Amino acid sequence: MSQDFTQHELDPSFVFDFEAYDDDLPDGQRWSTWLSVEPLCRGPQPRPDWVVTSQAALDTDLGILKTGKEADAFLLERAVPGSEALGESVVMVAKRYRSTDHRNFHRAASYTEGRSMKRSRDERALKRNSTWGRIVAAGEWAISEWDALKRCHELGLPVPYPVQIDGTEILMEWITVEGEDGTMTAPRLAQTRPDPVLLASYFDQLRDAMATMVQDGIVHGDLSPYNTLAAGERLVIIDLPQIVDLVGNVNGMDFLLRDCTNMCTWFRARGLDVDEHDLFGDLMAHAF
């Protein structure tokens, strides 16, 4: 039953306070898209404590991190205004696939062999490389990387935690190191010169990660020291849109050997005695 209160019946000590936010946000800022995406478009459970799920959070572009042939990576802050508490403020990577200018997707056929597409119209558009086909390609590759990140994370592999996907944008964990100037992006493995002990540890981590992938029937397909990050004493593998089915793709074994060659060449140049054919053989022992 409802009850009306007169002015004299209200508690004079009660104070109602609120802060209004303008819907007209400046360029480079938006309301958090966390609740606007489907549950399946959010990262796997259990989620890290730093993931911001509050509807009051704002997304703010902080600048470009890396440009690529198919996508660009930006730093994005998701934060509840005025709060720096855990779970209310975080900086992530926003990877955005270009929707109309995929000049390098002509090489995609060897990677995507064995994958299926639900809509024949989309498949025809892809083959014709029409404007719609390029839009479809952007979405397909974003979804492919999203699925790969989730799969690899759930396998316990060292990949960035996938926060969410919204169209052609993936939000993921920002892999960092602490430097003299504060927190910064972890360097690519190719940029580092680790001492012999750390070098051997990096190779062991790499071999274990590749073995786990092969055991699950997948290959990175484009693995190199340029898409592997050195986060202190830990290796982190990135850039996974072209992940390959080891058995379903007729090029699967070739991609695996190429990954082995790319990585072993770098490790040898740094002074570690490793061989790509030995690594390939070790990995294949996990495949069947």
Image (cartoon, rainbow, N blue to C red):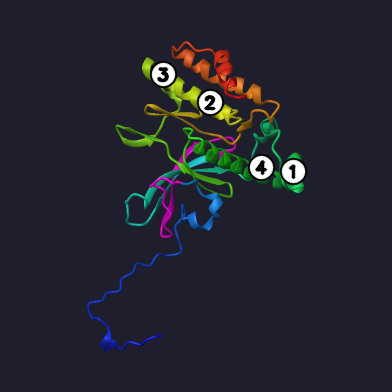
Task: Say which quadrant the N terminus sits in.
Answer: bottom left
> Which dot, 1 or 2, sits closer to the camera?
2
**Magenta segment includes 66:** yes
- Sequence-first tag of 1 and 3: 1
- Where does residue 127 sit, x and y in percent of width and height? 75, 39
Q: CA distance from mark 1 to mark 4?
A: 9 Å
Which amino acid does the dot numbered 4 rest on?
Ala
Q: Disc 2 designates what residue?
A: 210
Residue occupying image coordinates x 52% and y 20%? 263
Q: Are marks 4 and 2 in contact (CB under 8 Å)?
A: no
Q: Disc 1 designates what residue?
A: 123
> Which dot, 4 or 2, sits closer to the camera?
2
Q: Are marks 1 and 2 in contact (CB under 8 Å)?
A: no
- Sequence-first tag of 1 and 2: 1
What secondary structure is marked by label 4? Answer: helix
Q: Are marks 1 and 4 in contact (CB under 8 Å)?
A: no
> Which dot, 3 or 4, sits closer to the camera?
3
Q: Is residue 94 above or below residue 272?
A: below
